[in-house]
Image: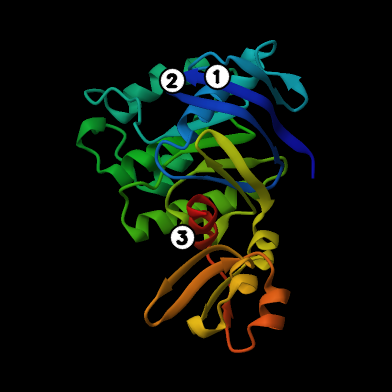
Amino acid sequence: MKPILEVKGLSKSLGSFRLQDVSFFLTEGCITGFIGVNGAGKTTTIKLILGLIAKDAGDIAFRGKDILSNEREFKNRIGIVLDEGYFYDELTLLEMKSVIAPAYSDWDDAVFRRHIERFGLPLHQPIGTLSKGMRMKYAIALAMSHHADLLIMDEPTSGLDPQVRLELMDILLEYVNEDGKSVFLSSHITSDLDKVADGIILIDNGRIVFSEEKDALLDMHGYVKGDTKELNERTRGLFVTLNETGYGFSGLTNDKAAVRQHMKNALIERPTIEDVMLGYIRR
């Protein structure tokens, strides 16, 4: 699979917060989840990629070309869905489309109307009267209507009910089945990423902790439960993070083979993305 976006050594100071040497890449045909707690640096990273704030250092390339030197081409080839929306609430969906469409050289009105019909959106209704789920569907319709190769999404499912979130995940899975498409999805709802993500990038305190293929990441780790009698100086060292109570222990390991060897009665379960994320953040 070809890389579609490459980020190298990205840094930015914002008051007391610093994004430090952030590097990762996205590949075609993949949904990459970008995770971390609030304030970890997810939105700052996305704003730097989009050019909404200026970077202090680092390089960002889209299909091998520097995005600053090829800004027009880059912005034509990406679709953006942000939690805030950035729409004029008093405008109707059709009027807002008329504001946005001229910014893209490949805008396709037939594709836009197909998505509007599919999502059941009222073109002549003011945006301010829409539910959050409908606003997100509208944002996705706009993002997909100029044949974008990469969707960049910042918390698109925050505050949505499970049914609407499931619908949006299905839309993204369908989108990346097209040749050359990719999704970069920042979200704190890791259960959505359990369902659809191909890769996971964890950022914490402005630094990348890991960037891994999702299934390999989950296969590498285990969520372990057992009796505290099995804990000693040696076995405690097998855990990324460990929680002990009067009833037993639970913890995340990245060495399942050693746990099986030295903790015969421990139960090892496949972790969720949230288990892995919290394990590395809390250690």
Q: Which residue is disc 1 drawn over?
A: 104
Residue located 64% across and 34% down the image? 149
Residue 76 visible in the picture? no
Q: Is the residue under label 2 in contact with that under label 1 (CB below 8 Å)? A: yes
Determine the residue located farthest toward the front in the rendered image.
Answer: 233
The disc labelled 3 sits on which kind of residue? Answer: Ser
Label 2: element kind: helix
Q: Which residue is disc 3 drawn over?
A: 191
Q: Which mark is residue 100?
A: 2
Residue 94 visible in the picture? yes
Q: Which mark lies nearer to you, 2 or 3?
A: 3
The disc labelled 2 sits on which kind of residue? Answer: Ile
Q: Residues within 10 Å of mark 2 (few under 14, many from 20)?
A: few
Q: Where is residue 40 in the image (x, y as percent from the top left)?
A: 46, 37
Q: Where is residue 72 in the image (x, y as percent from the top left)?
A: 62, 13
Q: CA–CA distance between discs 1 and 2?
A: 8 Å
Q: Residues within 10 Å of mark 1 (few under 14, many from 20)?
A: some
Q: CA–CA distance between discs 2 and 3?
A: 32 Å
Residue located 24% across and 39% down the image? 130
Task: Decide which of tag 1 and tag 3 comes sooner along the chain.
Answer: 1
Residue 219 in the image: above or below residue 141: below
Residue 45 in the image: above or below residue 59: below
For the residue pair 236 and 146, the one nearer the viewer reads as: 236
Determine the residue located farthest toward the bottom in the rendered image.
Answer: 265
Q: Is the residue under label 3 in contact with that under label 2 (CB below 8 Å)? A: no
Task: Decide which of tag 2 and tag 3 comes sooner along the chain.
Answer: 2
Q: CA–CA distance between discs 1 and 3?
A: 34 Å
The disc labelled 1 sits on which kind of residue? Answer: Tyr
Label 1: element kind: loop
Q: In this view, does 121 lie to the left or right of 105?
A: left
Quadrant placement of the N terminus: top right
Q: In this view, does 253 lie to the left or right of 258?
A: left
